[in-house]
Image: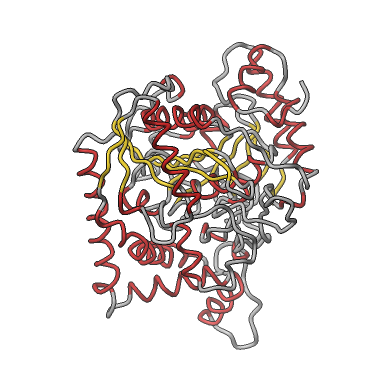
Amino acid sequence: MSDLNKLGLAEARDALRKGDVTSVDLTNACLSAIEAAGALNAFVHKTPEIALEQAKAADARIATGDAPAMCGLPLGIKDLFCTKGVASQAGSGILEGFKPEYESTVTQNLFDAGAVMLGKLNMDEFAMGSSNETSVYGNAVSPWRRGNDDAQLTPGGSSGGSASAVSADLCLAATGTDTGGSIRQPAAFTGITGIKPTYGRCSRWGVVAFASSLDQAGPMTKSVRDAAIMLETMCSHDPKDSTSVDMAVPNFEAMLTGDIKGKKIGIPREYRMDGMPAEIEKLWGDGADMLRAAGAEIVDISLPHTKYALPAYYVIAPAEASSNLARYDGVRYGHRAQLAQGDGITEMYEKTRAEGFGHEVQRRVMIGTYVLSAGFYDAYYNRARKVRTLIKKDFEDVFAAGIDAILTPATPSAAFGLGEMTDADPVQMYLNDVFTVTVNLAGLPGISVPTGLDAQGLPLGLQLIGRPWDEGDLLNTAFALETAAGFVAKPGKWW
């Protein structure tokens, strides 16, 4: 078999079981692809020795006939996950040199199942960004191009390295995290599948925190089936995470029947934004037609508080970030500034944080500190929390009325060029999250499925939002959409 790095998880798993390939073969194919793809800047800490050691162990385990689905499959790990003895910087200069003495629960679950770590992936600093342009490692670059244009495009953010690596076949799949759309938006921009599970389904222990009530890990894969396989391994109850739910994890892959007859799919009227590109409008309509043709009933619904979601998100997320990022002070780990004669502890904090944090992180920490300050706590933070409750209730009411899933666009546009938005008003960048943040505020599962190309040949995705804890049903609906859309486009290799 040639081009082993182009396989998906399901195909590679089946080939491993049959003895057609070994995990070492798969891993070497991916390591070669990574070495040849420096222009994408997707992998920022490469771990070939660990990968080959894990691959050999996986091959031995598969030979015994007792190996889980993920055994022997090479993955990329977002730099937000703490990996024991391997640099885990969250894309930030302030964590330079930090090598954890422990493993995040999600990566431990994957390694326990025999998965192989190829290395750590680029990301926006502390997951704050929608374009992977805030990383201390420099920009991650999309493998896609607009027609014959050589302009470098964003792979989306904050899981931009993960999206670029999976789309360019540098790994079979990757971990991502999603605080306001950071799995679903980059998946849509790069023509791959990404699912954010229900809040509490995957442990947050050992994942560097951005906004603790919104952060959730999930898989970024080449297909819905692959997402189902990987998500099952990533999920678990974890006593080390107080928000982790103690609930059985179903066999998500077994639930992929493609049968959605009689399912009610909601189309929220509030997501029809002014100025929405005609291509996104058409994609959305086509997606609804595909689900209708598969036997689902399409229902117009209302989520009246949608218009308040972005402002509420950009109060709550920075508030939690300013609290979470207070621990990076130069005292115990990571970067510490050089101090002048006579500098005290206050100067050390100030200089370390000024040097270690990038501009976007500084901006969000300052916004968060402002909205939590004594005179503004009720006016901003408490009001945003009340709005969040109303947004959550909108979804509860719709699901209580019998809706099984909700179909929306994943992004307001196709991928834009690197540098095209960074000089503009930062709010323009924040608008990229307009379709995704409601799902995090309500703690619901959401999945982005690639369903078409725009006029310039760039991928476009649709988002399905599911009932809480019903990832299996959501994945099945996504499977039906994926089957109907038949998206098979890949980026032309230029790197």
Q: Quadrant of the N terminus?
A: top right
Asked if residue 81 lies left or right of residue 314, the reply is: right
How many numbered discs, if any? Answer: 0
**Residue 48 visible in the current orientation:** yes
Nearer to us in this view, 383 or 450: 450
Q: Position of residue 26 (x, y in %)?
A: 72, 27
**Residue 83 visible in the current orientation:** no
Asked if residue 393 lies left or right of residue 439, the reply is: left
Q: Position of residue 93 (x, y in %)?
A: 63, 65
Nearer to us in this view, 288 or 174: 288
| Colour style of the rendered protein structure | secondary structure
**Residue lying farthest bottom?**
342
Q: Quadrant of residue 187?
A: top right
The residue shown at (42%, 39%) is: 202
12, above or below 319, in the image: above
The residue shown at (33%, 72%) is: 372
Nearer to us in this view, 348 or 45: 45
